[in-house]
Amino acid sequence: MIKEKHHLHFPTTYEAILERIALIDPVAYGPTRNYLDGAVTYLSPYISRGVISTKFILAEVLKKGFKTDLIEKFIQELAWRDYWQQIWINKGDAINSDLKNVQAPVSNYSIPGAIPNANTGVKAIDMAIENFYKTGYLHNHVRMYIASIACNVAQSHWKVPAQWMYYHLLDADWASNALSWQWVAGANSNKKYYANQDNINKFCYTNQKDTFLDVPYEAFKNLEIPDTLLNVEILDLKTPLPEQEALSVNENIPTCIYNFYNLDPHWNEEITANRILLFEPSHFKQYPISKQSLDFAFALSKNINNVQVYIGEFQSLKNDYNLKDIRFKEHPLNRHYEGKEESRDWMFNVSGYYPSFFAFWKKCKKEITF
């Protein structure tokens, strides 16, 4: 088992984020990304919080002169994030339930207690979950392993386990999270994703045997739910929002609204404006996050000059402070905002719903110079 890497500390200053972008090795990324110690970027928390965009990261990498054909896998993985967002934009709340197929079989609508308690008996998984609580980060392959255990071995419906993972992730992105869980569970894909113990041993550098996953792939379809996973838990996930404090607002200048998905310090920085970070209790009731995730977002917001925090609903903010010229960035969770909606920085000019990533990617590729 490899040791936790120094990257698993996530600094919050913009300068430190730029330093992390400078360290990207997009060539090594392709062949190594599935290994726990692979050349992944550790940038997902900053992309998810809207501090930087996929477009910005790609531009910074291309400035270094990398040939696009050598880094296609890297570009493709960035494009997955935009793809999930496009599905959310086009499908809206439909991503909160089985999107393409009904997940089956389902024996419960909760989560096997062994997962949140880091007690599955699969060493690589349990250690990853313990580190997850400390760092707010999980390797993408490990996320898939956990989802496969929860949905395809324990027969839990994907929604509650996905909420548990989202709650603790610093890179909490409901589209990426919910749709990836559905992809593993067969609700957003043509077949379920399975990982057996040999696969986990290979990519996590363990050599464990005799676990409930130590079976050939063809055995998964008829696998009984292991005793370890039979006890399920109902989770009580709550967001520890702080109390609202009074704002100092000038109603005669524009107001830029930031939120959990937009903490871009350079957005509209050239204009004089009220800058308000809006955290709506209704949003965090539906999509709860942990204190660690909340504190991370607040720390990132300090990169925005003169930002003030408002804990309350959009309409209350608008009415209480008589806001007239409101600006915000597009996002599926902002549809009730009123004012001037501004576009996000997409990597490609490809929009709309594509039932598969590769249909989406085929269009994106046309915009890349090889």
Image: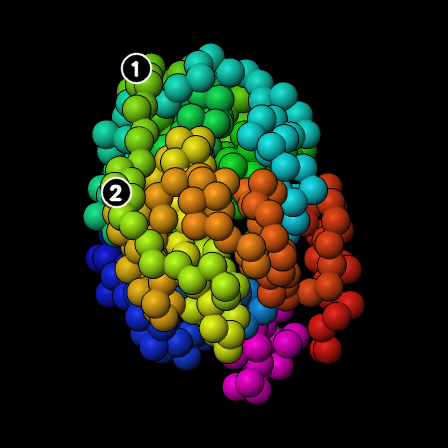
> Most extreme residue toward the top, as rendered?
107
The numbered mark, 1 or 2, whose residue comes first in the sequence reads 1
Q: Nearer the viewer, residue 283 or 361?
A: 283
The residue located at (50%, 64%) in the rendering is 252
Q: Nearer the viewer, residue 115 or 307?
A: 307
Cα separation between marks 1 and 2: 34 Å
The residue located at (73%, 78%) in the rendering is 369
| Above or below, 85 relative to 224 | below
Dot 1: what SS? Answer: loop
Dot 2: what SS? Answer: loop
Q: Which mark is residue 292?
A: none
Identify the magenta region. Answer: 57-78
Q: Which mark is residue 242?
A: 2
Residue 47 in the figure: left or right of residue 243: right
Q: Residues within 10 Å of mark 1 (few under 14, many from 20)?
A: few
Q: Are marks 1 and 2 in contact (CB under 8 Å)?
A: no
